[in-house]
Image (spheres, coloured by chain):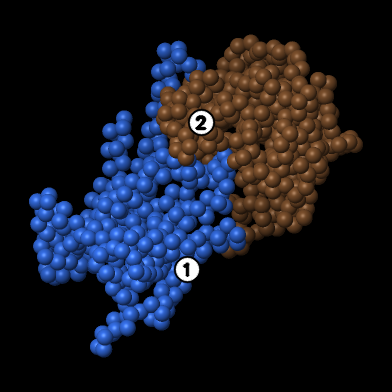
Amino acid sequence: MRLRRALIALLAPASALILAVLVSSIAVLLIHQSPLTAFKDMAQFGVRTDSLIFAANEAIPLFVSGLAVAIGFKMGLFNIGVEGQYTLAALLAAYVGAVTPVPGFLRIILILLVAMTVGAAWASVAGILKVTRGVHEVISTIMLNFIAFGFTSYLLAHLLKQQNRPGDFVVKTKEIPSSGLIPSLNGLLRGLGVHPPAGSDLYGFLPLALALGIVYYVLIWRTRFGFDLRASGFNPNASRVSGVDPRSMVLKVMILSGAVAGLVGMPDLFGLYHRYTIDFVAGLGFTGIAVALVGRNHPVGIALAAFLFGFLDRSAQVLDLVGIPKEITIIMRGVIILCVVIAYEVVRRVVQAQEVKAAAERMRQLSEEGQTEPVPA
Amino acid sequence: MSGSVPAVQLEGITKRFPGVVANNRVALEVSPGEVHAIVGENGAGKSTLMKILYGMQRPDEGTIRVNGAEAHFRSPKDAIAAGIGMVHQHFMLADNLTVLENVVLGSEPTLGPVIDFARAKERIKKLSGSYGLPLNPDRLVEDLAVGERQRVEIIKVLYRGARILILDEPTAVLVPSEVDDLFDHLRELKQEGVTVIFISHKLEEVLVLADTITVMRAGRTVATVKPQDVSRRQLAELMVGSELPRPETKESTVRDEVAMSVTALTVRTPGGRVLLDSLSFDIRRGQVVGIAGVEGNGQRELVEAIMGLAPVIEGRIQLGDRDITHWPTRSRREAGIGYIPEDRQDMGLLLPSPLWENAMLGHQTKPPFARGPWIDVAGARDRTRQVVDGFRVATPGVDVPAYALSGGNQQKLIVGREMIAEPLVLIAAQPTRGIDVGAQAAVWDQIRRARKAGLGVLLISADLEELIGLSDALYVIFRGRLVAKLDPQTVTPQELGAYMTGARQEVMEG
């Protein structure tokens, strides 16, 4: 039974993936190229060690972003503001981390705490607006994104940028000392017999992200708080009647989601940029929504979805070399998202019908054995 | 009448749903121009049979004949074309449109590109005149009372040319005086040669109104009788298939201790309109306090105030000797208020979640469901098994999702989870609405047993029989006020009805 359920759970994403490949094949055919060559090249390029590390590095922040979104989704709350939350959080965390005189290890903690606090604070604005004024969080978080972008640019350009040497026009904060950075995992990889080429460093944030995934799972499925949260998502009326205060729940979940969102920029901050710059990685918050959707708000699903997105992004780089626009993978991404949503709905209905049938069947057996009364239709 | 071709003849109708045979070789014969009642417990297969006759579902086996001709309905459209119309239990009307607009909706008479309202109005007036169904076609539906809305639904069906009318539990939503009106209308329709098929589980009504009664039980038609040949008791026995238990002789279990005390409770809308007007009553331990009233007279607001779901404007609510007026819902539940909500699916269950999570709902802060901040899965499953066994919830296990259970079993699970927590006070809102007779008896039994053990119960119900049978004290609520305190031992349904509709009022002192 459990095995069959797991198989059914896999059926949806697998069929979505196959359908996505078919649709993108048609797109490739339309520009008179061979889809077979395209996918073969992508696969060959994608599984190279440096490609996999690149894909993983891209997947780590997407995973964190997916978790941030999923916390809200689990109770039917849409935090579309992860983008703005992590942008502002990354700037302030990078600045505070660079200028505060604390010893190495503590500096990492300080940066993470600042990032989480800023993300939580920014998200809480939307939460407060919702519980006091009834403003829908989709509207407020989208609006707050724009404010966050503008605020970040202003702070960076006017207050937090470092004095550049003449000729350096990139606006940026002071660099975080290397003692305050999370080292890459390449040492570990070499210990495992994998030898990454030079310039290809697996982000040291990976274990933290995994820990975050585990904390997410335990919180949602094993704690009273998580039960209240899920109950609110399944049936807001029933959860209110059961004693959940919907207002405080909205506020708590928004703050929690924002705190995780604040961490979205951290893998790249520690692993690549080491400071906040005007061209800091963007778009992770929005992609995180898709990742949470494809991953069905489950940490394992979110991890797989994040890696799939990273892998597609990386392996697409090779397409330019064979004369196919790499935007084809953007089509694929879109199709995957659509197909996953459809496939899950179909599977959900099938499973639901089966559950009802199985329950009724089991009841009939029991009543024949005379153990309980028969079930009325 | 005998010897003529039956208006409706069903033979060997069988309809299977996954794991359940809803209709098992059902036979039904309805003579033209009669009122034919179909009675049976919930889940006996009445609704399925009517859906088949109305083309909403197709039978797996069997034949349908309408006026002698074999019919194969693929959709209600086909049934309407054959002259069959159905009035659903839940009205399907657009509140913001007029009666006229609602009636023509979907079959508008046109004059070129525009709707010919004048002609439509003419026809509606003719219909309402000839069938004795008074209606003003220009009124907005939102301004109409429930009984009038039902009339709109009936006109709507007649407008489409129906000569065979199916009414699904038409009296469930009506007050007693409206029921009388409806029966007059139905008799009028019969006079005009309309055939009426009337689904109900209220036996008195059926005995008063019907020319012929068909009884269904467990998916089969078990008997077709004439009302003058059977007593209410015989009919009930046909329905449930065994002799009904005699109502137990009531001995008072009421103790002196007050379990809950409500004093001068007043609730207003944000606009200042009074919803509850200075309500005061006590619930003693071992006492069932019943609240009778037509829906929408403040029952919901009363429950919300007691459960802490809406703020109390004035007044006081005490649980034992604790003032809980301003406590949050969770604290009230933890302090020992159990709650059976009126709408089990909307307010009482997490349908996609397993039973053990549903059994936690409302008790998730306490052992055995929780240990500190953690959920105790093993403890929760154990307790759920106790609920399932103790309250005879028919289920294959505690891991099946709640949607897999039948309505009666879902309700037993809710009643069980509230009872097993041994509350001080139970707020029971429509505790047996929409469940079959067997489950209903089980729920009543549980309430009686808990009452004997000292539970105080606030019972809010639309089922007068339930109220009179269970309550130790009975209040009537009308427009947000308690207008009468009655003795359930001596009160008659007529008396209750008079208070419920505001025809009589009694001065209530504190």
Colour of chain A as rendered: blue
Instruction: Inspect the image, locate mark 1, and give the three-letter code of the amino acid beneath it.
Output: Leu
Name the residue at 45% across, 25% down: B382
**Mark count:** 2
Residue at 65% over, 59% down: B116
A56 shown above or below B394? below
Residue B6, located in which quarter of the rendered image? top right
Check if mark 1 and mark 2 are on a common chain. Answer: no
Residue visible at 49% across and 32% down?
Answer: B369
- The image position of residue B401, as x and y in percent, is 44, 33
List the residue tagged with mark 2.
B367
Depicted A314 relative to depicted A218: above or below: below
- Asked which quadrant contains residue B41, the reply is top right
Q: Position of residue A41 (x, y in %)?
A: 11, 61
Q: Find residue A144 and name its label.
A: 1
Q: Which chain is brown?
A: B
